[in-house]
Amino acid sequence: MVFDTVEELASFYANYGKKMGFGVSKRSSRKSLEDEEKRYATISCHRAGKSQSKTKNSLNPRPITKTDCGARVNVKRGINNKWYVSKVQLEHNHPFGPSKGRFYRCNRVINSRVRRQLEIFQRVGVRMNKGFNTFVVENKGYENIPITEKDCRNYIDKVKRLKFGEGDAEAIQSYFMKVQSTDQNFFYSWELDDENRLKSLFWADARCREAYEEFGDVVTFDTTYLTNKYHMPMAPFVGVNHHGQSVLLGCGLVSNEDTMSFIWLFRTWLTYMSGRAPAAIITDQDQAMKKAIEVVFPATRHRHKRYKLVKYKLKKAVYDTLTSNEFQTAWNEMLEKYHLKNNRWLKDLYVERQCWVPCFVKDIFWGQAEKENVEEFNSYNSWYPPITRYAMEEQLKAVFTNAKFREFLNELTGKMYCGISSSKLEDGYLEYEVIEDIEVDGKIKKKSFSVWFKKADYVEECDVKCICRLFEFRGMLCRHALTVLVGNNIYSVPTRYILKRWRKDVKRRHTKVKKIAKGVPVDLIVGHGS
């Protein structure tokens, strides 16, 4: 058989499954090696795969549904963009029956007529159980209805999220128009559903755009911040300023945390930012968000925040390894020692290790957060007394913000625990072995770090890099690199290692832009009891 789209195949197989009495799901799709277009897809029985119990209480287990069923249809894309069935497996390893087919999620679809009727019931105050009984009578029995009462309740809950209260939409639009009259660079956009109800909302001012020009290399996006009174998650885009603090780069509200909603929000934000995608983006481990990032920001490095949840026993494997090979060895030893080889969560984390393990992501800058104005004041009105004789301390104290100078001091004083063990010449670089005394569980242990150094006639042309990659990861020269610089009689830091991002003597354009006007309808955007 031949299909125009994968969705057409999924619909065909779902109808077959409904008659036979099983559900279906889209299990996988793969891209060709030559291009980014999808070339292969599989529609399988809903019981494909193996169930993993997620309950923490073994005495109160949750039911499982997967039986590793092999029934499926495989298709591949032809040169005419048609989808050709390449393999069919009809045998199931579980019982099923025609009377059960209507209960599977893939068959429970609320059509437009039923949606309109449900919304009428909701507006006039008809209780859900009575409204649903109307459908039962109209269709002469439950067996003739492709939905359940719970599906109807879920739909109405979604409608409530999409619908503003009386006057709310007008209040937001009026406010945004007022701001736009005083700030021509203020931007807002919203997305409506098929019934012209608010689905998603985005806004940003000129300050956001200017801040993105300077601090848009790494962006954090998080929908767990708070929700408004309509239970719409607030989704701020956040960058990192020269104090290592958070700075707002735009904000949105989304009614559904699905891939299409995130795609709309990301594209809208990208449009306001003149189409310049960030070099890196940090999110939680949400699959819908991940798919949207792949569509809108295909060249952006994506890193998860979920690594912070790793327990103490995993820290050595995750944080004390400098290379991928070291991580691989430590990870395998940890799985073996604690009998975690079959842990599904750890397996999923390992598959995406390039997104969260430090030794895989340290080749690109990632930032952190606090409050900007106070640190701006502190950087110009306070300073640190000298603690060393090195010229680099005075050099960076004069240009770094206080927060970043404190980080540099931490590395400079940490140099006292480091010493050069050996060196060798390789490919024009001197490779040094720097030994650092590190405290582990109250005991001092020695750890080796490789540092590569190329000397030049002028200090500014010197090149130094360490295997710990603190500079690439945090924008700060590490104690191991400083040890090698001082060991080569270099007492000032080459300007290439003094990032503009951390300087207090740079005029920041976003700080000159007036903040958003007072009078924000806070109860609409933030809500109550959030």
Image (cartoon, rainbow, N blue to C red):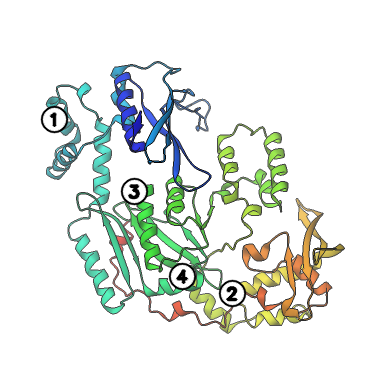
Label 2 vs 1, first from the N-terminus: 1
| x and y, in percent, of residue 212 in the image | 46, 70
Three-letter code, disc 2:
Trp
- Left/right placement of residue 117 relative to residue 220 reads left
Q: CA distance from mark 4 to mark 3?
A: 26 Å
Kindly check if marks 2 and 3 are in contact, taking CB atoms under 8 A apart as contact. Answer: no
Of mark 2 and mark 4, the one earlier in the sequence is: 4
Instruction: Please indicate, yes or no, whether residue 494 appears anywhere in the rendered image.
Output: yes
Of tags 1 and 3, the one toward the viewer is 3
Would you say residue 257 is visible in this rendering?
no
Determine whether 457 is above or below 189 in the image.
below
Q: Which mark is residue 212?
A: 4
Mark-to-mark CA distance, 1 and 3: 29 Å
Q: Which residue is mark 2?
A: 502
Which tag, 2 or 3, sits closer to the chain's start? 3
Residue 258: % across, % down: 37, 47
Q: Residues within 10 Å of mark 3 (few under 14, many from 20)?
A: some
Circle 1 residue: 134
| In front: label 4 or label 1 | 4
N-terminal of the pair, mark 4 or mark 1, is 1
Label drawn at residue 256: 3
What's under tag 1, amino acid-wise? Answer: Thr
Q: Residue furthest front?
A: 79
Q: CA distance from mark 4 to mark 1?
A: 54 Å
